[in-house]
Image (cartoon, rainbow, N blue to C red):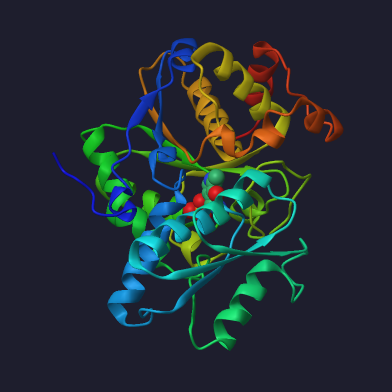
Amino acid sequence: MKVAQNQAQLIGGTPVLRIPSLSKLTGNDIFVKCEWANPGGSIKDRAALSMVTKAIERGDLKPGMTIVEGTAGNTGIGLAVVAKSFGLKMLAVMPSGQAIEKQRMIELFGAQLKLVKPVPFANENHFYHTARRLGEEGKDFWWANQFENTDNLLAHYENTAPEIVDQFKGDLDIFVCSAGTGGTVGGNTKYLKEKVKGIKCYLVDPGGSGLNSFLRTGEFKSEGTSITEGIGIMRETANFKESQLDGSFSLEDSLHVSLARYVQEQDGIILGSSSALNLAAAFKLSLENPNQNKKILTFMCDLGERSYSKMYNDDYLTESSINYSMSLDAIIEGLKKIAL
Ligand code: PMP
């Protein structure tokens, strides 16, 4: 039996789950890689570990220093877990208005939390610029810079994607996921395209994000908004640049929020908000290729208990005009209408 010596050593090696209901409905196998099984509860533990270990190896991050990062929450939690394991301190700069569950977890894992007003990226006070300034001004601070630091995507190129190839013995037809920093999509698609013959890779974008339009037209344009957290961007990051994609599409909240309720009822799976979007995208791609025994994979980036106050809060959804009770037929019809 292998015994971990600290929590950071538990990061990675996550299991894969076949979704019974959606696989049966479409005659394909729809899988999720369960990233909530990481010690900090999300896929961002992987990026945190990679960025920190490589910075220590380079000598940029030394004992006694404080890691600082701008985060929608999960990277802050991941860095807090890794910081404790390595005897470092952690300061997370987070925009207010994200799910309260993530703020609480950052502090419970022992990091300091600085909340800033949510403002557009161009504003100096955006959480990204605030974290960068703190990192540049304090000599004992090290700024992780998850958006532009490609040690983020290397977590996936060196670990996540090789795990996938191993778990599927190289037999996978379709991969789809969304992007926050682009590390997940960048690192995984780069490796999968190299190693899995014929695999098709897609990006799914939430409302309010410009990546789908950028990939189709070269211009960042967005429509609507989304309750999803930690995903969607309006610029091309160094991590996203490495993506190897065959296509992209956008999904509006009502479709994936309603599908999350269906999967909850059928399979007892409680999806986080980006996971709901990812799974709805995998379901759409399965509907495009019915009854072909295709193997389709996406990520379950975190659990719904981290978005309980929004995704599974009927009052919040009603106030936000998000329909959470579409019928399965209406969801399927909505998904089929979206052009690939
Ligand atoms: N899902 C969740 C729940 C996240 O917190 C994030 C990152 N903030 C992502 C997906 C996107 O991952 P990446 O930053 O690697 O694009």
Using the image as rendered, state which of residue 38 and residue 326 is in the foreground.
38
Classify residue 210 as left or right of residue 55. Answer: right
- How many numbered circles does the render carry? 0
**301 relative to 304, above or below:** below
Image quadrant where one finds the C terminus: top right
Taking the spot 36% from the left edge, 53% from the top edge, the residue there is 156
Nearer to us in this view, 18 or 239: 18
Residue drawn at the location 42% of the way across and 67% of the way down: 150
Can you say whether 28 is above or below 92 in the image?
Answer: above
Task: Spot the residue most to the left.
Answer: 1
Residue 302 in percent (x, y) is at 50, 39
Rendered residue at 29%/54% (across/down): 6
In the image, residue 28 sits, relative to residue 282, either above or below, namely above
How far across and down, in percent of the image, does residue 306 sit?
Answer: 59, 39
Asked whether residue 179 appears in the rendered view, the answer is: no
Tell me where residue 171 sits by quadrant. top left
Q: Position of residue 160 (x, y in %)?
A: 33, 48
Residue 263 visible somewhere in the drawing: yes
Q: Quadrant of the N terminus?
A: top left
